[in-house]
Image (cartoon, rainbow, N blue to C red):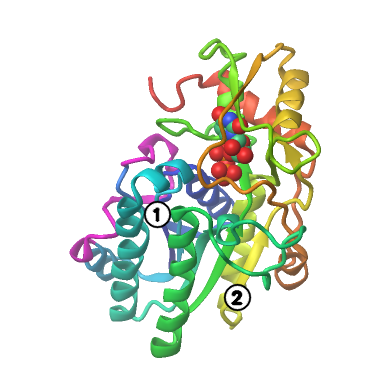
Amino acid sequence: MAILVLGGAGYIGSHTVYELIDAGRDVVVADNLLTGFKEAVHPKARFYQLDIRDRGALDTLFQAENIEGVIHFAASSQVGESMSNPLKYYDNNLYGTMVLLQSMVAHGVDKIVFSSTAATYGEPESVPILETDRTQPTNCYGETKLSMEHMMSWVSKAHGLRYVALRYFNACGAHASGKIGEAHNPETHLIPLILQVPNGQREKISVFGDDYPTPDGTCIRDYIHVTDLAQAHILALNYLMKGGDNNVFNLGNGVGFSVNEVIEVARAVTGHPIPAEVSPRRAGDPAQLIASSEKAKSVLGWKPQYDDLNTIVSSAWNWHKAHPHGYEK
Ligand code: UDP
């Protein structure tokens, strides 16, 4: 039987496919290639170009393939865009997930692991954040991911499907092989944008706000390597296959770095001065997000391998240096 990875041509999806194939699994990838790249799809995966909002295409896939479980990454994921175009997020993330669940229920596929986010918490009451803490998103992206979790829960009660929601903190870094890495168009994430400066594609990095209630005034985030995230999806799927119940897990390193600290680490890794300039706050950004991932460690047996920001930024730099334009020729 095969594992279906929706959004398997995207950043975290493609890394998860590599880990699944390394673990000897049969993998089917589906992606609409609107933000993903065909070149990121592992050559041993069977690829379907489809949109999860297309019920007919999903039904055809479930009829053609013997799918044991689904890992669902196919969603829009930019905080800033979700604030200016919220309906795109309701359409792709919520409506898309609804169509996917309809098709899964119709075909008796009853296990799903999916990407949720630290943005479900909004401004945290305290750090590190626990899965039981209040969820009150401050941006539409986080709101749609929280609604996806709720949708799974109701569908589970009615149809017996089981799910694991993985609330990622800040995904970064690239695969050790150098074959795949982070590539977004347009790029909005901090580490790839910083690395565009030593790559000669940008003169300076903008720091979005230096008046947050943090020690240096810039936002604090918990940066977690994409390969560690990928491993967590495999563990979560194994957990469901062993009969595990619906669950939600944070995935982070439990250590926060400010925007200024990340820039400093990138200067050390690249040996480039990387000029920085303070600019206005970005809408919807909480001041500080740091995970407690104790639950993923104890229940899933997850052990992040890349727990040092220097190593993480070095792995990102290896990829960006060799692929300054991502997958584009
Ligand atoms: N950020 C920044 N300059 C940039 C891009 C991002 O200062 O050019 C900040 C952003 O405001 C946030 C942090 O870097 O505090 C991480 O942002 P990113 O978009 O990478 O991830 P997010 O936290 O939105 O998931």
Q: Position of residue 85 (x, y in %)?
A: 33, 46
Where is the C terminus found, in terms of image quarters?
top left
Where on the picture, by quarter, is residue 98? bottom left
Residue 226 in view: no
Q: How many marks?
A: 2
Q: Is residue 237 above or below residue 29?
A: below
- The reply to whether the C-beta atoms of the residues labelled 1 and 2 are less than 8 Å apart is no
The Cα–Cα distance between marks 1 and 2, rounded to whole angstroms, is 20 Å
What amino acid type should be assigned to the residue bearing mark 1?
Ala
Other-residue count near label 1 (Cα within 10 Å), few / some / many at <14 / 14–19 / ≥20: many
Task: Give whichever of 193, 173 is nearer the camera.
Answer: 193
Q: Which residues are magenta?
A: 34-57
Residue 239 in view: yes
Q: Position of residue 37 (x, y in %)?
A: 38, 37
The residue carrying mark 2 is 247
Say whether disc 1 or disc 2 marks the residue closer to the N-terminus. 1
Q: Is residue 211 above or below residue 243?
A: above
What amino acid type should be assigned to the residue bearing mark 2?
Asn
